[in-house]
Image (cartoon, rainbow, N blue to C red):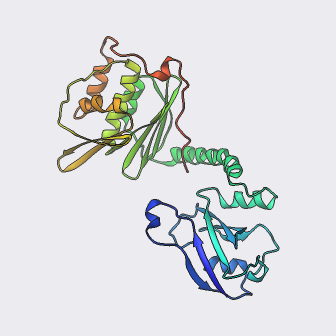
Amino acid sequence: MHLSVDRDSVAMGDDALPHRRTLEVADDVSVAELLQTTRPDVSAPDTWTWVCHWNGVPFAVWSSGRGGRVWDERYRTVADLPTRDGTPELFHAYWTQVDSDWLLDRLRAGEPLDRRALERQWAPVAAERRERELRERERTAVERLLDAETVDALAAFGADVDLHTDTVCRFRVGDGTWVARRIDTMTLVDDPRGRRGSLRPVSVAQLWLVAAVAREVGGFEAFTAPLVPSDVRTSPGLWSITRTVQGRQELAQQHRPEDVEWFRAVLGRTVAEVVAAYRSPRPRRRSWPRWRRGAVRRDPPPLSP
């Protein structure tokens, strides 16, 4: 028979070409062979999960590392699958990183295929797994995301490091949680109100992080005049500060407009200079952040797998 195979897009760039294709398969081929032949035509990590639909009826779970498996044992061969007029269609619905073994167990136990409900059930399981993985990484990794000078500087302003690996540093300042994490070449920083900055290289991220914490804790601006020139580019909801040092670009993407000018004044300085400036007695020249004045705090989102 001729079979139409299609799938969800996994990213904006993935939409450049259509995913629909036509294959020919035998009526007596097993479902396992069918799913191996029609696997999603995208390079995907083993953790990506897809739910397979035959003529609109969901019947199997697919993952790159574990293949395709049905949760309804009635479906053993292609001939067992629901029929309709015209060319049959196999569609792969992308379920991101919901673990395929976990999902298959839930469906075999009779859980309805309600995506929102299942993702809510999966979220705490995923967070617990991720935390265990990070603790093991902290135990075994030699490198750390932030250097010792930065960690000591953060401690000088009351930061209590809870987790520190080669890719993640999580710490508390007062009753708020901050998280710095490396994604490719960028270091992303979340504070108690959400995403705060995205920076590279890590030396710029370390300088920014110390200055941001010192500024929040101290409640004043230690530097008001820029030491070095930098450029600012604005786009909706994002302010990009750049400068070039010895042919290498430094980049700080700010997610809040109030962070732009103070960080331009910090650029070119050292962590030690920031610590010295903010540890000196200064008058409080601005009000506390809104979340310190009694507004509801929002800790950063859980670390994604």
Whether 241 is drawn above or below 35: the answer is above
Q: Quadrant of the N terminus?
A: bottom right
Residue 207 visible somewhere in the drawing: yes
Residue 271 visible somewhere in the drawing: no
Q: Residue 280 appears in which quarter of the rendering?
A: top left
Whether 305 is drawn above or below 157: the answer is below
Q: Position of residue 159 (x, y in %)?
A: 45, 26
Q: Residue 50 appears in which quarter of the rendering?
A: bottom right
Whether 141 is drawn above or below 239: the answer is below
Q: Position of residue 274 (x, y in %)?
A: 29, 26
Count of labels in the image:
0
The residue at the point 64 percent across, 82 percent down is 3
- Residue nearest the viewer, comparing 258 with 270: 258
Q: Position of residue 92 (x, y in %)?
A: 62, 68
The residue at the point 70 percent across, 69 percent down is 56
The residue at the point 30 percent across, 39 percent down is 204
Q: Judge left or right: residue 37 versus residue 291.
A: right
Whether 61 is drawn above or below 159: the answer is below
Which residue appears farthest toward the front when viewing the image?
85
Q: Residue 188 appears in which quarter of the rendering?
A: top left
Q: Position of residue 61 (x, y in %)?
A: 68, 66
